[in-house]
Image (cartoon, rainbow, N blue to C red):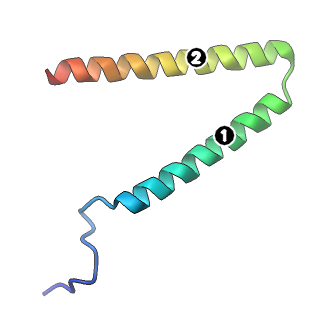
């Protein structure tokens, strides 16, 4: 028998997911700020272009994933 006080490890934990998402975002923002604070104008342009390309690729991938579900 299992103890009902112990959470089922196979069930998602929304509080844990929210907490870890915030920590991951905070770390990503910290790293981005560090990178942008020490870059030249040309480096900044390159970093913004890279970020834009990554965001666009993520959006396309998400859209393709949704289209495949239908």
State the mark number for residue 63: none
Left or right? Give the position of 26 relative to 3.
right
Earlier sequence position, callout 2 versus callout 1: 1
Q: Residue 67: percent from the left, percent from the top?
A: 21, 17
What mark, if any, has residue 52 been given in the picture? 2
> Up-down: is 21 above or below 66?
below
Q: Is residue 2 left or right of residue 36?
A: left
x, y percent for residue 10: 24, 63
Is residue 67 left or right of 15 when viewed as pictured? left
Task: Report crowding for label 2: few under 14, some 14 to 19, many 20 or more residues within 10 A (C-alpha).
Answer: few
Q: CA distance from mark 2 to mark 1?
A: 15 Å
Position of the N terminus by quadrant: bottom left
Residue at mark 1? 29
Say if 53 sits above or below 6 in the image.
above
Looking at the image, which residue is at 79% across and 17% down?
43
Q: Position of residue 7 (x, y in %)?
A: 28, 74
Residue contact between numbered discs 2 and 1, judged by CB atoms under 8 Å: no
* Mark 1, other Cα within 10 Å: few <14 / some 14–19 / many ≥20: few
Image quadrant in which you'd find residue 4: bottom left
């Amino acid at each position: 028998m299992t103890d009902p006080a112990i959470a089922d490890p196979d069930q998602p934990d929304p509080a844990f997911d929210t907490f870890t998402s915030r920590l991951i975002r905070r770390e990503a923002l910290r790293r981005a700020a560090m990178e942008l604070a020490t870059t030249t104008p040309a480096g900044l342009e390159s970093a913004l272009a890279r970020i834009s390309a990554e965001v666009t690729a993520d959006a396309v991938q998400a859209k393709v994933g949704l289209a495949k579900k239908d």
